[in-house]
């Protein structure tokens, strides 16, 4: 076998094997929306959040073309935490572009969900930076495992928000 023929044969075999190993490219979509929801109950009022969010979903496939993983990246570019009884009392976050961020990875075969980031990050005037959630956590449909810094409302963050937004 001459050298030119063996190079062509090798290139053809390599290309054929490479094509079979390539997975379907990921599909991505980005949407922007405003979301509003209650965060903390403060007796006479609730602390509510109005957030402007960019959500990018990316769907990944295996080499057979089956959906295997979904990644959801959330970036809140502006969030207003306000008193539900008196919306003039509010704290605005993220308008400078820092915002809150959350990455969610979902294994579509096992259903396991992995979260990481700081979905709620608040600075209270006169108090300073205050994080409600930051770190990594996993949900497998039955068990919740967390690693990181978590200061949920029932541990003091909520009372600080209630105090900051009280009339």
Image (tube, rainbow, N blue to C red):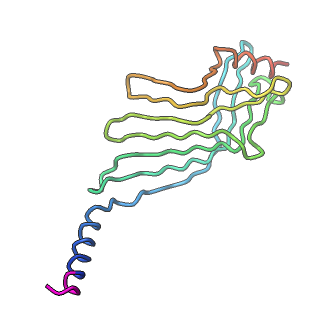
Q: Residue furthest top?
A: 43
Report the quarter where the N terminus lies.
bottom left
Q: As drawn, is 145 to the left or to the right of 93?
A: left
User: Vertical placement of 67 versus 50: above or below?
Assistant: below
Q: Residue furthest left?
A: 1
Q: At 39% across and 46% down in the image, what residue appears?
A: 69
Q: As drawn, is 6 to the left or to the right of 42?
A: left
Q: Quadrant of residue 91?
A: top right
Q: As drawn, is 88 to the left or to the right of 117?
A: right
> Residue 78 in the image: x percent, y percent?
72, 42
Q: Nearer the viewer, residue 54 or 87?
A: 54
Q: At 62% across and 40% down in the image, what residue appears?
A: 101
> Residue 67 in the image: x percent, y percent?
34, 50
User: Vertical placement of 75 versus 3: above or below?
Assistant: above
> Residue 138 in the image: x percent, y percent?
45, 30
User: Vertical placement of 33 versus 133: above or below?
Assistant: below
Q: Magenta span has 129? A: no
Residue extent of the magenta highlight: 1-6
Q: Quadrant of residue 64?
A: bottom left
Q: Nearer the viewer, residue 133 or 21?
A: 21
Q: At 47% across and 46% down in the image, what residue appears?
A: 71
Q: Main secondary structure of the magenta part?
A: helix
Report the quarter where the C terminus lies.
top right
Q: At 52% across and 26% down in the image, what residue appears?
A: 147
> Residue 154 in the image: x percent, y percent?
63, 14
Q: Magenta span has 4? A: yes
């Amino acid at each position: 076998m001459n050298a030119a023929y063996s190079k062509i044969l090798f290139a053809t075999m390599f290309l054929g094997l490479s094509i079979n190993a390539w997975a379907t490219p990921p599909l991505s979509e980005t949407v922007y929306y405003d979301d509003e929801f209650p965060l903390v109950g403060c007796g006479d009022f609730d602390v509510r959040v109005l957030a402007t969010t960019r959500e990018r979903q990316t769907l990944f496939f295996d080499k057979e073309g089956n959906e295997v993983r979904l990644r959801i990246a959330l970036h809140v570019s502006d969030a207003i935490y306000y008193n539900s009884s008196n919306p003039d009392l509010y704290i605005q976050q993220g308008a400078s572009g820092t915002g809150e961020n959350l990455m969610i990875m979902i294994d579509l075969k096992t259903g396991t969900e992995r979260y990481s980031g700081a979905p709620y990050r608040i600075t209270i005037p006169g108090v300073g930076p205050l994080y409600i959630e930051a770190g990594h956590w996993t949900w497998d449909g039955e068990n919740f495992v967390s690693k990181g810094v978590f200061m949920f409302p029932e541990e003091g963050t909520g009372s600080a928000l209630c105090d900051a937004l009280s009339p």
